[in-house]
Image: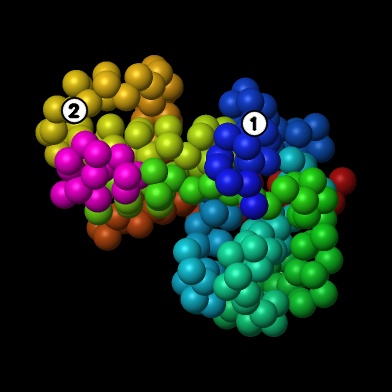
Amino acid sequence: MAANFWTSSHYKQLLDPDKVDVVQRLDKEKGVTLEEFRLIKIHMSLQIWKLALQVKVRQRKSMTEYDPRLVAPTCLYLASKVEESTVQARLLVFYIKKMYAGATSSDEKYRFEIKDILEMEMKVLEALDYYLVVFHPYRPLLQLLQDAGITDLTQVAWGLVNDTYKMDLILIHPPHMIALACIYIACVLKDKDLTTWFEELRVDMNIVKNISMEILEFFEYCRLDSKGNILIPEDRINAALNKVAAKP
């Protein structure tokens, strides 16, 4: 693994923001809109999170070509290997079936077998060009909070970082910039003025503010329940997934 982010494959593979939210040709032909594309990504990130809780994991292709309902658990399976917290494929299959125990016949694509996970794992690796090194915002977050003398905001900022994994930010921005954006939002929420501290960092505040706006827009886009959990209307996500699964 690279000694630091700036010499890592993660840094070299950062994506252009304009190329992230792009609906591929095959998906467009199925009538998938940009809004539905974003909905599916959010929905599947939530499904990965739910599966991860069940199996106790430590925490660019067309959707028409590869069913996101299979790609999501496969990504969790692969990530568990990378993080040396391996989850058996049969356990994932068990919980997928348990999660969708009440599925109707039209939802059979939710039910996959071990061989499906293993076959998709190789396709995911190929799509990633076998680059599996990822630097996370958590370490710089703690260091920055301590440097700013606001460790009392750790819980709020940490929770915001957790939510950024439901977006594409980690694929676009350096982890310390994501951490700074979360601190920036936490300061606004808790009415703390760190203007001087941010100025002393000599970072591009326009980028920090743009990341902050993306995070806030995400929360405006998704509804929250009484416990702060993200909710997506079932009818909207089902309609989007049905388009992806429809045969030409």
Q: Position of residue 178 (x, y in %)?
A: 42, 37
Residue 26 lies, with reference to residue 234, above or below; the image says above
Q: Which residues are magenta?
A: 141-154
Determine crowd level at label 2: few under 14, some 14-19, many 20+ residues with C-alpha closer than 10 A: some
| Residue type at tag 2 | Leu
Q: Residue at image x 70%, y 73%?
A: 111
- Main secondary structure along the magenta-highlighted residues: helix
Point out the frontmost of discs 2 and 1.
2
Residue pointed to by mark 2: 194
- Helix, strand or loop under label 2: loop
Q: Position of residue 135 (x, y in %)?
A: 54, 47
Q: Position of residue 92 (x, y in %)?
A: 64, 76
- Compute the Cα span from label 2 to label 1: 30 Å
Q: Are marks 2 and 1 in contact (CB under 8 Å)?
A: no
What residue occupies the far front of the structure in this picture?
A: 3
The residue closer to the viewer here, 19 or 224, is 19
Quadrant hosting residue 123: bottom right
Determine crowd level at label 1: few under 14, some 14-19, many 20+ residues with C-alpha closer than 10 A: some
Quadrant hosting residue 28: top right
Residue 118 lies, with reference to residue 184, above or below; the image says below
Residue 41 shows up from this direction: no
Q: Residue at image x 54%, y 54%?
A: 45
**Is tag 2's residue or tag 1's residue first in the polypeptide sequence?**
1
Residue 231 lies, with reference to residue 170, above or below; the image says below
Asked if the stretch drawn in magenta spans residue 93, the answer is: no
Residue pointed to by mark 1: 15
Query: In the figure, is residue 244 to the left or right of 94?
Result: right
